[in-house]
């Protein structure tokens, strides 16, 4: 068997993996759970209280809040309603957090690539005819 590239020797420096310097990509279940927990605590309510009001087991609701379980839309809607929110409210808050984390990740990646001499192109797009560069709703950040 012939290797496609020479095997590294002890004298060769290991290539640096820049992705290790970046925070991991956030998971949707983490973001939704964070929103539910933050809203519950802001209302001064216990997990048990929201569990009973939503008819979701306390153990399962706790797992959802900690991002350990991927809840169905029915479960999320029940939890949201128990908190006096709509499902759309919960998803919008999670979406805002995702955009915020993605922007921070992009800035971090740009600094890492800049230090390593890399090149990065970033542009924003929004709805056609929208006001501002990314539209009234924030738009989408595309990076290549």
Image: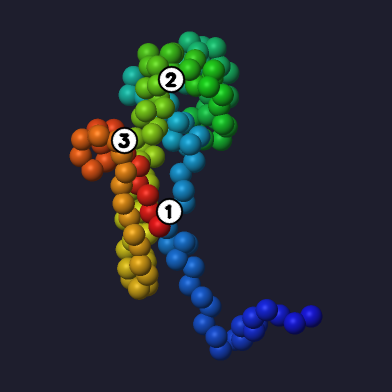
Farthest residue toward the left? 132
Q: Residue at x 31, y 39 (%)?
A: 126
Q: Where is mark 3, residue-wise?
A: 127
Q: Residue at x 40, y 24 (%)?
A: 90
Q: Position of residue 29 (x, y in %)?
A: 50, 34
Q: Which mark is residue 6?
A: none
| Residue 8 vertical position relative to residue 71 in the rendered view, above or below | below
Farthest residue toward the right? 1
Q: Is residue 5 visible?
A: yes
Horizontal side of 45 relative to 60 (left or right) equals left
Q: Where is mark 1, residue-wise?
A: 23
Q: Are marks 2 and 3 in contact (CB under 8 Å)?
A: no
> Which dot, 1 or 2, sits closer to the camera?
2
Q: Secondary structure at mark 1?
A: loop
At label 3, counting other C-alpha atoms closer than 10 Å, the crowd grade (few under 14, some 14-19, many 20 or more) is some
Q: How many marks?
A: 3
Q: Position of residue 138 (x, y in %)?
A: 29, 37
How far, Cα to Cα, is label 2 from label 3? Answer: 24 Å
Residue toward you, 36 or 71:
71
Q: Where is mark 2, residue-wise?
A: 87
């Amino acid at each position: 068997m012939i290797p496609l590239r020479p095997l590294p020797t002890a004298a060769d420096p290991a290539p640096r993996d820049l992705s290790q310097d970046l925070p991991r990509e956030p998971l949707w279940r983490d973001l939704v759970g964070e929103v539910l927990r933050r809203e519950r605590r802001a209302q001064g309510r216990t997990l048990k209280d929201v569990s009973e009001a939503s008819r979701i087991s306390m153990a399962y609701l706790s797992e959802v809040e900690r991002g350990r379980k991927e809840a169905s839309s029915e479960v999320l809607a029940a939890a949201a309603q128990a908190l006096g929110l709509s499902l759309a409210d919960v998803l919008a808050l999670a979406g805002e957090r995702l955009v915020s984390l993605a922007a921070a990740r992009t800035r971090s990646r740009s600094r890492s690539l800049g230090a390593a001499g890399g090149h990065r192109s970033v542009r924003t797009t929004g709805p056609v005819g929208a006001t501002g560069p990314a539209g009234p709703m924030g738009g989408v950040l595309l990076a290549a």
